[in-house]
Image: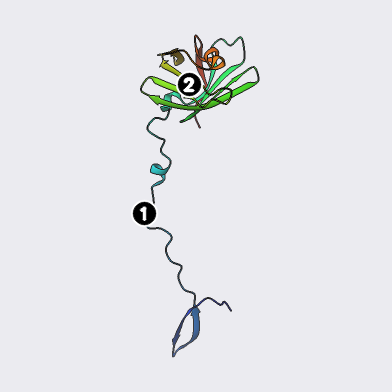
């Protein structure tokens, strides 16, 4: 028998039955966020058309760019670096990079053939990232999951 308090129900026609107390509610519909709201990305997240794994068009070297809603990762010939991104219209800011702490500000373009390019707005403070983004065309390899 449990040490938790319980309520007893008895009638003249039935034996005594113990009913455990109801647990208090953990949340109500008014104070719980909907799955859509809690899963939504921040306002400066990459738009869906930028998200996914991109590969250098006509790759002579193994160069891939993974774009998530608020992060990126560049893999080039087995070397990987990444960081945070924020997007405002056609401007994308690359920052908090694992190989260096500099910022890169670019204008992104996705043409009718679904080829993604980046044009620097100002010089990228991370030379390795600049090599992977400037004058490089990417095609979508894997869409976002």
Looking at the image, the residue that sits furthest to the left is: 30
Q: Earlier in the sequence, mark 1 or mark 2?
A: 1
- Which SS class for mark 2? loop
Quick check: 111 above or below 27? above
Q: Which residue corresponds to the image point at 38% horizontal and 48% vertical from the top-left?
A: 33
Q: From the image, which quarter does the N terminus lie in?
A: bottom right
- Within 10 Å of disc 1 (Cα), the crowding (few <14, some 14-19, many 20+) is few
Q: Quadrant of residue 98?
A: top right
Q: Which residue corresponds to the image point at 52% horizontal and 14% vertical from the top-left?
A: 130
- Within 10 Å of disc 2 (Cα), the crowding (few <14, some 14-19, many 20+) is some
Rendering colour mode: rainbow
Q: Which residue corresponds to the image point at 49% horizontal and 11% vertical from the top-left?
A: 134
* Structural distance between the alpha carbons of marks 1 and 2: 39 Å
The residue singled out by tag 2 in the image is: 103
Looking at the image, the residue that sits furthest to the bottom is: 12
The residue singled out by tag 1 in the image is: 31
Residue 97: x %, y % from top left: 54, 25
Nearer mark to the viewer, of 1 and 2? 2
- Relative to 125, 63 lies left or right: right
């Amino acid at each position: 028998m449990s040490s938790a308090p319980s309520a007893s129900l008895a009638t003249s026609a039935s034996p005594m039955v113990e009913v455990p107390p109801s647990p208090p509610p953990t949340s109500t519909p008014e104070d719980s966020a909907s799955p859509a709201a809690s899963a939504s990305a921040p306002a400066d997240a990459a738009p869906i058309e930028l998200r996914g794994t991109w590969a250098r068009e006509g790759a002579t070297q193994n160069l891939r760019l993974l774009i998530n809603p608020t992060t990126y990762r560049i893999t080039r010939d087995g070397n990987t670096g990444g960081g945070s991104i924020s997007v405002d219209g056609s401007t994308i800011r690359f920052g908090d990079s694992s190989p260096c702490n500099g910022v890169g500000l670019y204008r992104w373009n996705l043409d009718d053939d679904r080829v993604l390019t980046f044009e620097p707005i100002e010089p990228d403070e991370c030379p390795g990232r600049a090599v992977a983004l400037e004058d490089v065309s990417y095609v979508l390899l894997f869409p976002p999951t």
